[in-house]
Amino acid sequence: MARLIGLDLGSFSIKVVSLSKRGKGYRLDAIGIALNPYGARPGADEASQVRVAEAVKKLLSDNRISSAKAILALPESVVYTRVVQMPVLSDSELASAIHWEAEQYVPVPLDQVNIDYEVISRPEKGTDREKMEVFLVAAPKTVVSRTVEFASRCGIEVSGLETEMVALSRAMIPDSSGLGPTMLVSLGASSTNLAIVRDGMLVLTHSLESGGTALTRAISTEFGLEFPQAEEYKRSYGLDPTQLEGKVRECLRPLVDRLLSEVRKAIQYYNSSLQESNQEMQIKRVILAGGTALLPGLVTYTAESFGMEVVLGNAFSFIEPSATAAIPQDTVSFGTAVGLGMREL
C-alpha cells in the first residue's frame, strides 16, 4: 500500500511522518524530527537553503523514508484565505464565478496567485438561507514555485500543497468529532495561527507574528540568560506559579495576555456574526497545538482567561502505531505533518 508522507518545514524544527491508510484510520510507519539549522523556509538565501535541504534529506534517510513524494504545507502568513458568501451556485457555476469573487478579496493581481476553494455550506435553493459559504485560498505563484524547487533540492516530488491550518485541522479535529465550532490555536516558534473549525471546515483564519521564540527572548532579556538556557527555563517553568517563585510566569504573562487577547477577539467576532437562531453554535472549546502549546501552565491559564474548555490537541487520535514507529508522547507538535499525511490524493 502506498505511503502517505507529510513534511512540515517549521522555522524551529522539521517534522516528517509516513502513514498507511487502514480502513477509516491510519498506521504510523515512520516519524521523525530535526532542528531547522537556519530557521529558514523555502525562499531564504542560498546558503540557508542548502543546509536546510541537507537536514531534510538526512531526516528522511535516518527514518528510512524512501518515498520520493510528499505533501507540504504553505505558511499561513504568506497565503490569502477568506470565507466568502455567494449566491447558491452549482459546481460548474461556482468554478466560473470564483475568480470574479476572488478579485474582491485578494490584494494582488489574480495572475500572480493560484486559486483554490472548497464549499463549506450550500443550502438548497428556495430555503430561508439564500447564500452559500466558500473557503477561498490564494497562494502566490512565487511561493508555490519556491516550495516546489526546495522540495526538489531534497529529492522530494511534491504531490500536493495546502495551508498549515487546513492540514492541522484535519489531524486535530476530524469531520466526525462532533465537537461543534472550535477555536484551533497553533503556537509555533515564529508565529501563532488561529482557525475556527466548523463541521470539519475552516470558517475563519488569522496569523499573528509572535510565537515561542518571542517568549524565550523575553526570558533571556529579563534574567540575563543565553538563548538556549532561556529556552530551557521556558520549557521547564512556563506559566507555573509554583516554579522560581512565579518569576518566569510574571515575565511571560504580558506576551501571553497579548496573544490571548487576539484569540479572544477572533472568538468574539465569530460569535457576534451568528444569527439569533444560531446562538447554540457559539464557540465553547479551544484546542491548543504546536510546540509552544506545551508551555507549563498554559492550558489552565487559557481556560481561566476564557472561561471555557481548553485542551491540548491530539494529532494521533485516528492513528495506530506500527512495529517500526511508536506514537510520541508529544501529540501536539506533529499536527501539521500528520494532517498533511492524512490528505486524500
Image (cartoon, rainbow, N blue to C red):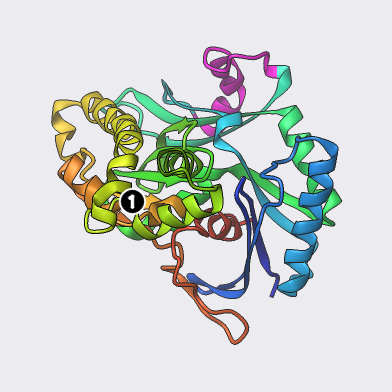
User: Is 205 covered by the magenta stretch?
Assistant: no
Residue 163's place in the image compared with 64, above or below, is above
Q: Amino acid at mark 1?
A: Ile
What secondary structure is the stretch in magenta mostly built from?
helix
Compare residues 57 and 98 and report the one nearer the observer: 57
For residue 262, what is the image quadrant?
top left
User: Residue 174, how many percent across, how many down?
Assistant: 41, 57
Residue 106 covered by magenta stretch: yes
267 and 88: which one is in front? 267
Q: Position of residue 108 (x, y in %)?
A: 64, 14
Badge 1: residue crowd in 10 Å (few <14, some 14–19, many ≥20): many
Horizontal and vertical percent for residue 247?
A: 28, 47
Quadrant of the rendered image containing residue 273: top left
Look at 76% across and 35% down and name the residue there.
43
In the image, the segment drawn in magenta is 90-110
In this figure, which residue is indicated by the disc labeled 1? Answer: 287
Residue under the image location 36 percent in, 51 percent down: 288
Left or right relative to 155: residue 28? left
